[in-house]
Amino acid sequence: MNPFSLVTRPVQDLLQALVMPFRALFVIGLTGTINYMTYSGVWWFKWVALGMGIAVIASLGRALKSALLLALVAWVGWKIYQRYGKASRERFDAWVQRASPKAAEVVAALRQPA
């Protein structure tokens, strides 16, 4: 199992939600063309379309779940920052300065606007 899957899975879910409708259109078009060229009285590609539709809906559901989870994490982070923000940041900066002055330079460089 990938140890980073907890971090990368939401990104993969969102990417799949964007790609899956196009993949479904390609597969349905291909099977529809094959069914048209080999028509024997039964339009069987409609079952492929049904299955791909279910796959697209499932993909959108996973993406929605990931987006809601990311929104919840962002909201909780914002609330924590509102409650402990400035004082906690000042304590952290003071601790970094005492512990390792070079690390304080790195933290200061990361906080500079680009």
Image (cartoon, grey):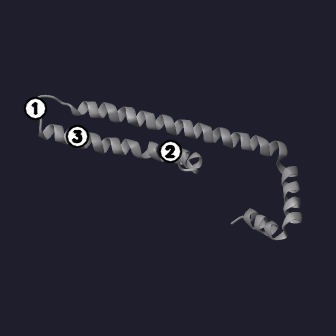
Can you tell which mark lies on residue 88?
none
- Label 1: few (<14), some or many (≥20) within 10 Å? few
Q: Locate residue 98, reporting x and y percent.
A: 89, 64
Measure how far apart labels 2 and 3 are at the Cα level: 26 Å
Q: Is residue 95 left or right of residue 59?
A: right
- Label 2: few (<14), some or many (≥20) within 10 Å? some
Marks 2/3 in contact by CB < 8 Å: the verdict is no
Q: Earlier in the sequence, mark 2 or mark 1?
A: 2
Can you tell which mark lies on residue 31?
3
Q: Locate residue 113, reporting x and y percent.
A: 72, 64
| Up/down of 101 relative to 32, above or below | below
The secondary structure type at the circle numbered 3 is helix
Residue ID for mark 2? 14
The secondary structure type at the circle numbered 1 is loop
The secondary structure type at the circle numbered 2 is helix
Image quadrant where residue 51 sits: top left
Amino acid on which the number 2 mark rests in the picture:
Leu
Residue at 80% x, 43% y is 82
Residue at 41% x, 46% y is 19
Amino acid on which the number 3 mark rests in the picture:
Thr
Marks 2/1 in contact by CB < 8 Å: the verdict is no
Measure how far apart labels 1 and 3 are at the Cα level: 14 Å
Amino acid on which the number 1 mark rests in the picture:
Ser
Residue at 33% x, 41% y is 24
Residue ID for mark 1? 40
Q: Is residue 19 left or right of residue 32?
A: right
| Up/down of 8 relative to 112, above or below | above
